[in-house]
Image (tube, helix red, strand yellow):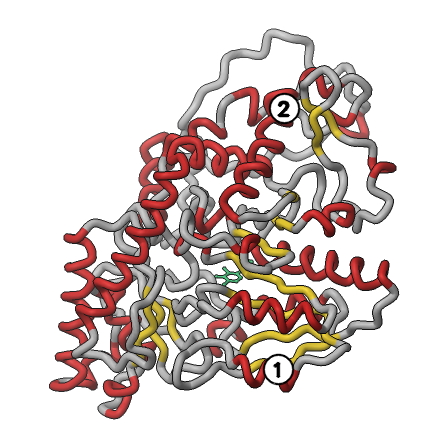
Amino acid sequence: MQTIFEKSTAGRKGVTLPKCDVPTGSAVPDRYKRTRPLNLCELSEPDVVRHFTALSRMNFGVDNNLYPLGSCTMKYNPKACERIAALNGFSSIHPMTAQLAGGHRYAQGALAVVRNLEESLCRVTGMDAFTLQPMAGAHGELTGMMLIAAYHRKKGAAKKEVLIPDEAHGTNPASAAAAGFKIRTVPTDPETGLLDVDKLREIISDGTAALMMTNPNTLGLFNPRVAEIAEIVHSRGALLYCDGANMNAVMGKFRPGDCGFDVMHVNLHKTFATPHGGGGPGSGPVGVKAFLEPFLPTPRVRVNAENGYALAPNSDYPDSIGPVAPFYGNFSVCVKAYAYMLMMGGKGLLEVSEQAVLNANYVLHSLMERYEVPYPKTCMHECVLSASRQAEAGVKAVDIAKALIDRGFHPPTVYFPLIVKEALMIEPTETEGKEALDAFIGAMAEIAKIAASDPKSLHACPTTTPVGRLDETKAAREMDVAFL
Ligand SMILES: *Cc1c(COP(=O)(O)O)cnc(C)c1O
């Protein structure tokens, strides 16, 4: 496909601007004036519309069809939240407004959103205080690890090690290492698919700063022994971190703050109404128990004497780790999340989680006979299957993923978690109806059948897309973006 510049034809116009009716150029010094005309493409309006419509059709999003990318919670997000975030008062406010003397009076709505969203997240998670600054889940993890480091430093404790289960999201060890910690892996019990508590007892030491735990974990399984794990961790002076990217599974049912977790992050762009993918924008707020609040990033929003909102002076937070992002994070994502929580209410959020879990179990049970299930138990918001049976006939998880593309579905997450061979991690989310789930299950069943009868035919998939199967190594090393 040609670029829009290659489609340009000299003299063709889409828009005609009115004649300029103000004096031109006089205020601009000559050295700043351009000497050559702007390199704009010249096309008619239909040319432009067709160009971008054609491009959009090469894309795939949750507006097209089911997008069961496990652990990513690619759910349909209400457009109403987008409209609210786009309101002029939210989208046009200058981020410095509240920082200027007296400026908070002109930013009450925005400051109220920050403060109320922090409080709403506290209610959902059982934490005592939140910061909205981190701009992604991984950024939240890094912030959480920095808070834990600051806490131990303040206490004069030499704790340099963070324990992470072997099924954890790859960002967990990366974030802990970026915050200066050494990583030690805690194995999963092969019988239960849950953190091996006996092994944890052996591995934990006085040098342990924290255990990072995802619950439900990336196998989609809920660990009911959290309180016991918290006790083991706390008895060594370490803290318990919750990777709460999967809150979509447990809202209204389980609050990490009630069960011994000290720090956690949530992913607004997974659970709370911001579409994601393609690199953002995201938001990974971090919640803490009260004893860690003094370490949170500044500036903090507080209720002032006039019962309005204002920024607290940074000098009130001498132990703060300082800002981790400009201003208050990705503000428009926060507005969407707050609007979503108000729209749903507590009962609505509980129903979200119940439906998400029901949908995942429906998919799991419908596919159990066709695919290997490494942990055949009730799952939470996602289920993990294995293509090991199909792999014996030469059809790997990647072939199944590509065959799904030909059938109009986004593939599930594949080859993760690492502890499952040929893993297919499916998260249908609560926003899919039974028809959509049945269509996906039908496609998975059909692919399993073909894998048994004509495995080679699946190696060519996808065949219906603008780009076929790529050599992924070569695609990264010898990038060619002009192939369409
Ligand atoms: C998505 C996810 C993360 C990372 O979040 P990003 O916003 O992609 O950085 C961390 N942990 C788990 C379990 C996740 O699903």
Q: Is residue 77 above or below residue 465?
A: above
List the residue tagged with mark 1.
201
Write down the quadrant of residue 151 in the picture.
bottom right
Residue 209 disc label: none
Crowding at mark 2 (Cα within 10 Å: few <14, some 14-19, many 20+) = few
Write down the quadrant of residue 100 in the picture.
top right
Give the residue at x 79% y 51%: 321
464 to the left or right of 1: left
The residue carrying mark 2 has its beta carbon less than 8 Å from ligand 1: no
Give the residue at x 64% y 20%: 108
Give the residue at x 45% y 82%: 419
- Residue 90 location in percent, x, y? 56, 25
- Residue 369 location in percent, x, y? 16, 78
Does residue 410 appear in this view?
Answer: yes
Quadrant in the picture for the N terminus: bottom left
212 to the left or right of 360: right
Can you tell which of label 1 and label 2 is closer to the viewer?
1
- Residue 137 location in percent, x, y? 57, 56
Amino acid type, callout 2: Ile
Q: Secondary structure at mark 1?
A: helix
Task: Tell me whether circle 1 and circle 2 mark residues in contact (CB < 8 Å).
Answer: no
Task: Tell me which numbered mark, 1 or 2, is placed earlier along the sequence.
Answer: 2
Quadrant in the picture for the C terminus: bottom left
List the residue tagged with mark 2.
93
Q: How many marks?
A: 2
